[in-house]
Amino acid sequence: MADSAIERASHSDVVNQIAPVPRISIQAFCESAEVAEVIESAAADRRMSKAHVKVHMGGVPAAIEAYRTAPTPNLIVLETYSERGTLVDQLDSLSEFCDAGTKVMVIGHENDISLYRELTMRGVSDYVVAPIDILGFIGQVSHLYNGTSAEVLGRVIAVVGAKGGVGASTVAHNIAWSISRLLEYQTVIVDLDLPFGTAGLDFNQDPPQGVADAVFAPERLDANFVDRLLSKCSDTLSILAAPATVDRLYDLPEQAFDATLDILRSTVPCAVLDVPHQWTAWSKRVLVAADEVVIVAAPDLANLRNTKTIIDSLRASRANDHPPRVVLNMVGVPRRPEISLSEFTKAIEVDPFGVVPFEPKLFGTAANNGQMLAEVEAGSKIVETLDDIGRALMGRVTSRRVKKTLLTPLLERLSRKKAG
């Protein structure tokens, strides 16, 4: 297994997430090109996809002039170089035109706690000291509208196959099982392959309702409705199953799953999305919006090409996130020519997050029995690999396992004695 890639998934990199900004209007009035550029770049980030952002130059005076005859947005962002007295007078003038409910964020160039206190006393929602970066700005806006709830939002992990038949669903379901079993996080598997999903089969369940009921009844969507659609697999794991029928066509709009995923993000610590191998407006939107993207691939040329293509596309849409994680599955099929791990890694320019060997008996038995791999063979190295991947995706990176032998207790005692 490529332990180094998992070890580099540091705790802060995985856990320090920013809650998506809600559907609000933001207008910024800047005095420097640097701050304007940061806000414009932030507006293109996936966490700001619902917000409507406009950037103007001219600072506070331009804002005062603009709102003399126009309604104010949900959030006004003001950059200023003005000294305290001038700034306070300008804000007093602006307050005459602000509608009720409008929040104001000031970006200043003076690190002064007394100024911060004076501005907040006058109704300014936040004071940020320049220079600012993209994620820092998004985090400040998110905190204004999500408050402390941003700290407890669940993680959304999207798993997709680089090609059909590479075992992406199996990997997704077993990773979710590991997260729920080892970390004891409430976890939901969302099967987005509406006509052919296998989550019900893999957990030996046939739920009468699931994700399609949420998609086709948006007017009923709330946390209670989604909770009723869940099928419980254990105390900590549930599935939002696909209908797995072709009685109807599933030509879904781009935002088909937005509301459902927003609800899951705010109600469960972990949601694992089993994304089918297709490239549509809604599937790309789901992948772009996820906190983590895992691409499952086999070591052949078609998988290599597709993996590189998906990574390049998502990098462009997720410029402020790390690249998708790559799990190589079904490695070592007898008599099958394969691309070596080093060549695959060099081509995609991403270290594999995990390598799962070809083990047809284990996988076949689990699939036919409607079980997870850990239920069939708990001590398998493959199970350990998937457990490590699950921990890493949730920010619970553990040190490399040390294989114990009969001499381990003696060596440990000698080490302690030497240290003492």
Image (cartoon, grey):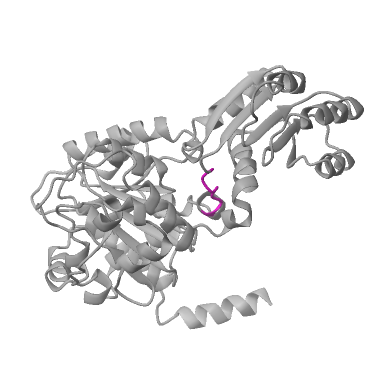
What residue occupies the far front of the structure in this picture?
69
Question: Which residue is rendered at x = 49% and y = 62% of the image?
Answer: 396
Q: Position of residue 299 (x, y in %)?
A: 21, 44
Q: Nearer the viewer, residue 328 or 225?
A: 225
Question: Which residue is rendered at x = 37% and y = 77% of the image?
Answer: 235
Q: Nearer the viewer, residue 334 or 122?
A: 122
Answer with the quarter of the image where residue 288 lies: top left
Q: How many marks?
A: 0
Q: Can the viewer see residue 202?
A: yes
Question: Which residue is rendered at x = 24% and y = 70% of the image?
Answer: 372
Give the residues in magenta: 15-21
Please name the predominant secondary structure of the magenta segment in the image: loop
Q: Quadrant of the C terminus?
A: bottom right
297 lies above or below 348: below
Question: Can residue 371 be found in the magenta stretch?
Answer: no
33 lies above or below 337: above
Q: Position of residue 23 (x, y in %)?
A: 51, 40
Q: Position of residue 417 (x, y in %)?
A: 63, 80
Q: Position of residue 330 (x, y in %)?
A: 19, 54
Question: Which residue is rendered at x = 49% and y = 30% of the image?
Answer: 44
11 lies above or below 228: above
Question: Can residue 20 be found in the magenta stretch?
Answer: yes
Left or right for 215, reference 16: left
